[in-house]
Image (cartoon, helix red, strand yellow):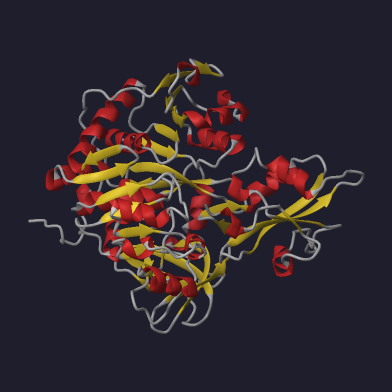
Amino acid sequence: MTTDATPVMPLPPARRTLPAMLQFAAERFGDRPLLQLAGTRWSHRDAADLAARRAAALQDAGVGRGDRVALLCGNRAELLEVFLGCGWLGALSVPINTASMGPQIGYGLADSGARLLVIEVGFLERLALVDLAATGLQTIWIVGASAPAEAPAELQGVPCRAWPVAREPVEHAAVAPGDALAILYTSGTSGPAKGVLCPHAQYHWWGVHSAQVLGVTGQDVLCTTLPLFHINALNTFAQALLSGAQVAYLWRFSASGFWPEMVALRASVVYLLGAMVPMLLAQPESTAERQHRVRIGLGPGVPAAASAAFAARCGVPLLEGYGSTETNFVIANRLNTPHPGAMGWLRAGFDARVVDEHDMELPPGQAGELVLRADEPFAFASGYHGMPDKTVEAWRNLWFHTGDRVVREVDGCFRFIDRIKDAIRRRGENISAYEVEQVLQMHPAVASVAVYPVHSELAEDEVMAAVVVRDGAAVDGAGLVEFCQPRLPRFAVPRYIEFMRELPRTENGKVQKYRLRERGVTAASWERPGAASGQRSK
């Protein structure tokens, strides 16, 4: 008999699919509250019914098993409904980052081969810079249109329609745990973004491991401001399905409004990223910081000092850990840890090594690349969509290569050092230096460019670009930023730009980015006005 305090346990192997998780929640938890999202309320029983009804509407739109459905929406109930409907049908959801502009949207649509796009009305104008004929789109559903003019009959020849009503429920497809549930794009490091193929069982294990680490039970209200196009927020829904808990999604993170919202929602578990905690600590102290019922938070990437200050001021301990879109919640720290700020210890069901450039295991205390694998089938991603070479490279020697440099202490605790990959982490987003460079290189005045991370006052990365201008051309930092803004997500637009006569290179002509990172921000660097990290909280 399941009670409110029963810890989350994995479902039997054959039932590690989204339809089975929905049926489990409906049968076990029934009319208990499951979802709060703006004015929408679902029970656990509602979720399975809505999935079956939305699957019928998707079928009417020509979506079948194995087809892809792209989603460009904020945190809305419609996004979750389509995600569940696709899983019920055996189709794949393809959430697109809402900060994406035309080039990134076009790439995601074409690369995934999505035949249906579900898009929030406020993002329609971004499709003007997308060649829809170069994609496989056959239909566009428009969410949130309140007037006929907001929902055009077609865009570039692709039929559009307002959000269709759900239909009579259909039976779920006979999906297997290893079948793909979603394609989640993660920024490339030396090339375009890669679509991670996430199987149903991986989603199940994300929910199990996260709920176990956080001690989630049916008594909890899980609350996140993180976006539903990332595994972090999608995984929060899985935790609720498996535990009988309730999950509340907010539209966005607001440093000033965070604690009043947590009080109003009666949140007990929160999900924060590294930069959010310094932003919250920068706010004036308030009574709401102690009136809440939050018992724990997940805070990957939060500096140890900020985590300690947060616990002392707000009474909320934060847990560190390690996971990625390709893997799972593999490593987690403990409350009252002897290693504050460390990622923590390996969880049961996974294996980890720290290796050198030849994949030879290194002894404790020596830094190397973290490689991972799972004991359970399909607990990790299946690979990269349409990129067999990148899949083989990342999973070589039967280990997933994270690209992260870590140290394993003598007692088995893992500590993050830095990233081996040429990626930048800002505002919880992985930014591809390659993609930023490609946009800057499009400017007619730019001869060459290198993009790299520099330190932020919020213990995260900031985007910096070193630019060489073509002979006879002229451009300034403001001009380059203006050029980038319609072509890049806002979090990827460089904060710092330094104009150089030449970039440091090897004898083979490769840019030596480590020298640029070591150089960092100098007196000659141009800084984007108003871009200071601390000024961006609201």
Q: Horizontal placement of 236 versus 94: left or right?
A: left
Q: Horizontal placement of 328 versus 348: left or right?
A: right
Residue 73 visible (yes or no): yes
> Residue 154: x, y in percent?
50, 17
Specify the farthest residue to the bottom: 410
- Vertically, is 477 above or below 69? below
Residue displayed at 69% across by 43% down: 484
Specify the farthest residue to the left: 1
Specify the farthest residue to the right: 472
Residue 422 visible (yes or no): no
- Vertically, is 461 above or below 443? below
> Residue 256: x, y in percent?
47, 55
> Residue 315: x, y in percent?
35, 70
Q: Horizontal placement of 4 versus 153: left or right?
A: left
Residue displayed at 49% across by 82% down: 365
Q: Count the marks.
A: 0
477 vs 180, nearest the viewer: 477
- Vertically, is 425 above or below 489? below
- Vertically, is 350 above or below 195? below
Pick the quarter of the image with the N terminus: bottom left
Residue displayed at 72% across by 66% down: 520
Residue displayed at 30% across by 64% down: 214
268 vs 75, nearest the viewer: 268
> Residue 372: x, y in percent?
42, 64
